[in-house]
């Protein structure tokens, strides 16, 4: 028996109690279980009636407690979605003061860069009216234009290792001086970067503090903007090889278009990546070849080409699709993958919301569905402009399933009046609306040209 069925120790899993379960409900649950045991033992009708009465009351109390719990959670999230717990008043005050000071400096620095035309036009990160969506639009439009001109294109998605943590302070301050940020302003930035330290905690032990001579603080207001300035000169390296590029923070996308008959494309791409890698090494940044993606978009109607690219002693082979700023792109620019992925994730979210729907009010359900489901339907949906209706029909089915859920109606209820009541445009109209809004902003200034 010891050989076939040896004894083993299994650690008991202590599941956390339900957050809506109060002391009163726990006491009522004990009484209910006691009544159940009494009826099973006696089999008397009076005990059965008593048990059913307690069960009905307990069910109503639990439903009421769950409803109050979810209502409070949703209202709290709506008022302050970034609210954190376990912070002291003193820490909260000092932390907020630092954020305010950084925000003031960030606004002044952004205004200075804008007024003196020092911003990299191909950097969409941390700039007003710029987003991952505008960055993806800029890239896909170049790829569409190249295909219309019967040119093949290569899209290289470069991945950096711990980019924010390896920024050299001396090089960054030198870059700021080259942009005219010197004198008192330069001294302030030197002070901002100086005196930072870090500690490591492992198994309850904490190391002694060590000085940080590299890196910009992630999660800060200024850190991302300083990183984009640190890479300001990289664009010249890329452009010198005849490549286009677009960046969003540390995500860099290289675009190279060429005639399908060009036999030098592979060598030119490798040469550009070699210079790119040399610039990164000089600035103490490191490429991650294992996470670098390569897409080849063939010039219509030419077949896809097989290019092997060398990067840091690694060979990068083309892939049929790759994830780019949260959107899966394929080498035919069909965008079928993002539609499939969004549909799958939204279906799962609706399933989970449906499970707790009996404990939610209509208003709370609407907030939940709009923040978790409808926001996913809207993310970068301008990329779907021009697709046939059958390509986006799965997204419309998700919206059609979400509307009855808000009103707690059967799945196959007529959705048109429900969408009107919720003021939800159908998916195709939402895409048109996004496109028109971006066009308006681009024409009137806030959005990138």
Image (tube, rainbow, N blue to C red):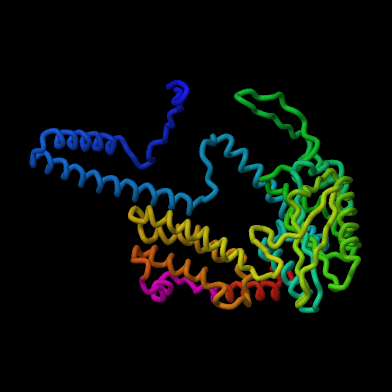
Image x and y of residue 230, in percent: 82, 50
Toward the viewer: 358 or 228? Answer: 358
Question: Residue shown at 59%/35% (left/top)?
Answer: 91
Q: The C terminus lies in which quarter of the figure?
A: bottom right
Q: Does the segment drawn in magenta span residue 426?
A: yes
Q: Please identify the quarter of the rendering in which residue 199 is found.
A: top right
Q: Please provide percent x and percent y for residue 300.
A: 76, 77
Which image quarter: residue 131? bottom right
Examine the rendering and report whether any part of residue 327 can be seen.
yes
The residue positioned 70% from the left and 73% from the top of the image is 442
111 sits to left or right of 41 = right
Q: Is residue 126 above or below residue 214?
A: below
Task: From the viewer's perspective, tell me whether residue 139 is left or right of residue 75.
Answer: right
Principal secondary structure, stretch drawn in magenta: helix
**Does the segment drawn in magenta span residue 151?**
no
Asked whether residue 121 is in view, the answer is no
| 94 on left or right of 120 | left
Above or below, 17 relative to 342: above
Q: Position of residue 398 (x, y in %)?
A: 48, 66
Identify the residue at image location x=25%, y=46%.
Answer: 59
Q: In the image as oriented, which residue stretches furthest toward the top?
A: 2
Residue closer to the observer: 288 or 110: 288
Q: Nearer the viewer, residue 381 or 121?
A: 381
Viewport quadrant of the N terminus: top left
Residue located at (40% from left, 73% from top): 415
In the image, which residues are magenta? 413-430
- Give the vertical position of 76 relative to 266 (above or below): above
């Amino acid at each position: 028996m010891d050989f076939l069925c040896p004894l083993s120790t299994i650690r008991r899993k202590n599941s956390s109690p339900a957050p809506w379960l109060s002391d009163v409900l726990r006491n009522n649950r004990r009484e209910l279980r006691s009544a159940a045991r009494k009826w099973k033992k006696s089999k008397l009708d009076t005990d059965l009636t008593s048990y059913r009465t307690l069960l009905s009351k307990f069910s109503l109390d639990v439903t009421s407690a769950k409803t109050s719990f979810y209502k409070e959670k949703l209202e709290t999230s709506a008022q302050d979605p970034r609210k954190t717990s376990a912070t002291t008043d003193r820490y909260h005050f000092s932390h907020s003061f630092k954020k305010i000071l950084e925000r003031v400096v960030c606004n002044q620095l952004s205004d200075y860069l804008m007024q003196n035309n020092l911003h990299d036009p191909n950097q969409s990160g941390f700039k007003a009216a710029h987003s991952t969506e505008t960055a993806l639009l800029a890239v896909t439009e170049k790829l569409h234009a190249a295909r219309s001109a019967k040119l093949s294109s290569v899209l290289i998605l470069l991945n950096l290792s711990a980019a924010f943590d390896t920024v050299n302070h001396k090089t960054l301050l030198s870059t700021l001086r080259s942009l005219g940020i010197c004198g008192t302003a330069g001294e302030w930035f030197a002070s901002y970067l100086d005196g930072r330290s870090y500690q490591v905690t492992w198994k309850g032990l904490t190391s002694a503090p060590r000085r940080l001579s590299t890196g910009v603080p992630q999660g800060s207001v200024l850190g991302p903007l300083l990183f984009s300035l640190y890479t300001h000169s990289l664009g010249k390296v890329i452009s010198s090889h005849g490549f286009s590029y677009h960046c969003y923070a540390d995500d860099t996308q290289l675009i190279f278009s060429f005639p399908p008959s060009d036999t030098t494309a592979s060598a030119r791409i490798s040469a550009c990546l070699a210079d790119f890698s040399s610039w990164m090494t000089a600035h103490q940044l490191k490429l991650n070849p294992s996470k670098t993606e390569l897409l080849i978009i063939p010039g219509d109607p030419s077949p896809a080409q097989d290019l092997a690219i060398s990067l840091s002693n690694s060979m990068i082979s083309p892939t049929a699709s790759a994830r780019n700023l949260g959107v899966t792109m394929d080498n035919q620019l069909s965008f079928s993958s993002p539609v499939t992925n969004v549909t799958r994730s939204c279906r799962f979210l609706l399933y989970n919301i449906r499970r707790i729907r009996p404990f939610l009010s209509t208003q709370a359900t609407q907030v939940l569905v709009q923040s978790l489901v409808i926001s996913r339907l809207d993310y970068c949906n301008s990329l779907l402009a021009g697709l046939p209706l059958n390509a986006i029909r799965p997204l419309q089915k998700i919206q059609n399933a979400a509307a009855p859920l808000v009103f707690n109606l059967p799945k196959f209820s007529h959705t048109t009046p429900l969408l009107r009541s919720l003021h939800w445009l159908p998916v195709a109209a939402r895409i048109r609306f996004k496109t028109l809004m971006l066009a308006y902003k681009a024409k009137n200034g806030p959005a990138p040209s």
